[in-house]
Amino acid sequence: MTTINILQQPTSTAWLDQAIANLDIILLDHSHCERKAAAAALNLMFRYPSSRALVDKLTAIAQEELEHFTLVNQWLDRRGIPLAPLNAPPYGAALRALIRRQEPERMLDFLLISCLIEARSHERLGLIGEHCPDPELAKFYRSLMASEARHYGAYWVLADTYFDREQVARRLEELAIAESEILSTLHPEPRIHS
Amino acid sequence: MTTINILQQPTSTAWLDQAIANLDIILLDHSHCERKAAAAALNLMFRYPSSRALVDKLTAIAQEELEHFTLVNQWLDRRGIPLAPLNAPPYGAALRALIRRQEPERMLDFLLISCLIEARSHERLGLIGEHCPDPELAKFYRSLMASEARHYGAYWVLADTYFDREQVARRLEELAIAESEILSTLHPEPRIHS
């Protein structure tokens, strides 16, 4: 597995404290995140239905996100948490606002934003896996790590498939700075991306 | 497996002749249909994220549609057909126009429209499986039959879970009559739902 260090700033201990103190809400939000990640992969396929490498990789990603969604929902059952709507934190919308409107830049930005969201999820789910006081739940979070890393790797590989590597690196850095900036103020509601 | 006879009119031989004469386009359209079916299942989950029975069944359906999407794309490769966009026939939009705007009627209509689309797909893919001149491709189509039947059964069961059975039967009949009416004029471009 290729390790890609793309996040500009690590997650704050303030986020970790907030997450560990609100594990039930984090689990529920995690369920929503997996569903949204599957939908995001499918939506991207709808935008570029003839780009075969993209379609193949995104199909595999969407399938894995749906598997995780099912697993997280089983954890909700175990802890007696009903599926319920949750307000999304500003993170996703703030990132999507950075996507340029013109092709081919738009495709590059879609891929890199997805790459960053997956990389951040990987980092934060890993932190929960390390610090969660419930050893079974901690183990579950650690079990998700390999495929979460594969996902952000896959988005990076797709960007690298369709775009010049130097252009990818430059834009990824700009977006990564913005991503860390968005998270620099902790959102008051506990979320995977608060 | 429960057999549910819900289609008001069987598919015409004119459609079958058109499909068999244009198998490559039908295969490409079939790929798009599997992708759209997965997305439709996910979209429905987004509308009713707290309805657990619905979320569980639609997750399983979306996963199977993505598996079929991958299999159909392998058939495109085998026959040297590139993934390319195709105009959708009027069928999907005409059916969606029948969905009532108010809840809970909207949910019922979403479920029954999906049920009808899956039932029609099941019927037509079955016809291809019976009449396709390529025995390997015919076998592939027959292999999809069981899960296609499961899908329309699942949408019916969901409607029956959330609504009164008599109300489901009445509305399903109205929509099934409309569905057959939409297909009574063959669309000039060969499609699964032309």
Image (cartoon, coloured by chain):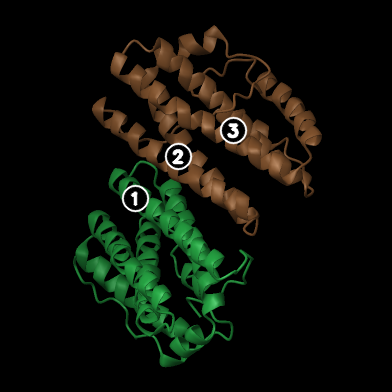
Chain colours: A green, B brown
Quadrant of the frame with the N terminus of chain A = bottom left
Circle 3: element type: helix
Q: Are marks 3 and 2 in contact (CB under 8 Å)?
A: no
Q: Note whether B120 is above or below A193 in the view shown.
A: above
The amino acid at mark 3 is Gly
Q: Which residue is under mark 1?
A: A60
Circle 1: element type: helix
Instruction: Give the camera-side residue of A76 and A103.
Output: A76
- Tell me the distance, in whole angstroms, between the alpha carbons under discs 3 and 2: 15 Å
| Dots 1 and 2 on the same chain | no
The x and y percentages for residue B95 are 66, 32
Instruction: Give the camera-side residue of B164 and A171.
Output: B164
Left/right of residue A52 with respect to residue B190 in the rendered view? left
Circle 2: element type: helix
- Tell me the distance, in whole angstroms, between the alpha carbons under discs 1 and 2: 12 Å
State the image quarter where residue A4 is shown: bottom left
Q: Answer yes or no: is residue B183 visible.
A: yes
Q: Which mark is residue B5?
A: none
The amino acid at mark 1 is Ala
Instruction: Give the camera-side residue of B157 and B45.
Output: B157
Chain letter of mark 1 equals: A
Q: Residue at x 51, y 65 (%)?
A: A31
The residue carrying pointer 3 sits among few (fewer than 14), some (14 to 19) or many (20 or more) residues within 10 Å by Cα, namely many
Q: Which residue is under mark 2?
A: B65
Q: Are marks 3 and 1 in contact (CB under 8 Å)?
A: no
The x and y percentages for residue B183 are 62, 19
Q: Nearer the viewer, mark 3 or mark 2?
A: 3
Q: Which residue is under mark 3?
A: B153
